[in-house]
Amino acid sequence: MLVLQAARRFPDVDVFGLNPGFVRTNIRANLLGSRALVAVVEWLTSFMMIEPDTYAARLVPLLVSRDLNGRSGAMFNNRAEAILPSPSASEPSYAAALMGASDRLVSRALAGRAGEGAGT
């Protein structure tokens, strides 16, 4: 939904969504606390994982392709295949709620940064 809304809000910027799935990295190493538990989870999910170099080899050519011109809002899986948004992503009430919440978070973050600078 964020990809679709960003494409609508910023028509002069090309926005694309990437769904890499599970990429074999150690990003989840601290997620479960126990190294043994992490090793078990990694082993159980290993059949769904893709190597980072494989993912990059598939996606980098796509991201520099001229075929993407004029296709802002397109989304791709870890094989660089176009994927459709979920049906709820085009539901106007969901989009309005998500974008409203996102706008409020950005406003709070910006206000917090402005407050930090005021004391220095």
Image: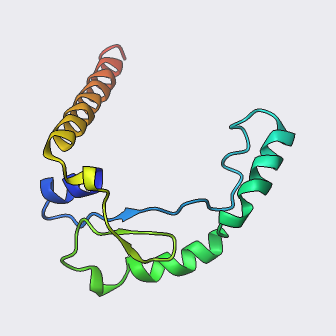
Q: Is residue 46 above or below residue 105?
A: below
Residue reaching furthest to the top: 119
Q: Position of residue 99 (x, y in %)?
A: 21, 39
Q: Position of residue 112 (x, y in %)?
A: 32, 21
At x 18%, y 48%, the residue is 91
* Count of numbered circles on the image: 0
At x 22%, y 69%, the residue is 72
Quadrant of res 13: bottom left
Q: Which colour style is shown?
A: rainbow
Q: Nearer the viewer, residue 48 or 54?
A: 48
Q: Is residue 42 left or right of residue 89?
A: right
At x 56%, y 80%, the residue is 57
Quadrant of res 120: top left
At x 14%, y 65%, the residue is 12
Q: Position of residue 105 (x, y in %)?
A: 29, 29
Q: Is residue 11 left or right of residue 120?
A: left
Q: Position of residue 23 (x, y in %)?
A: 62, 62
Quadrant of res 85: bottom left
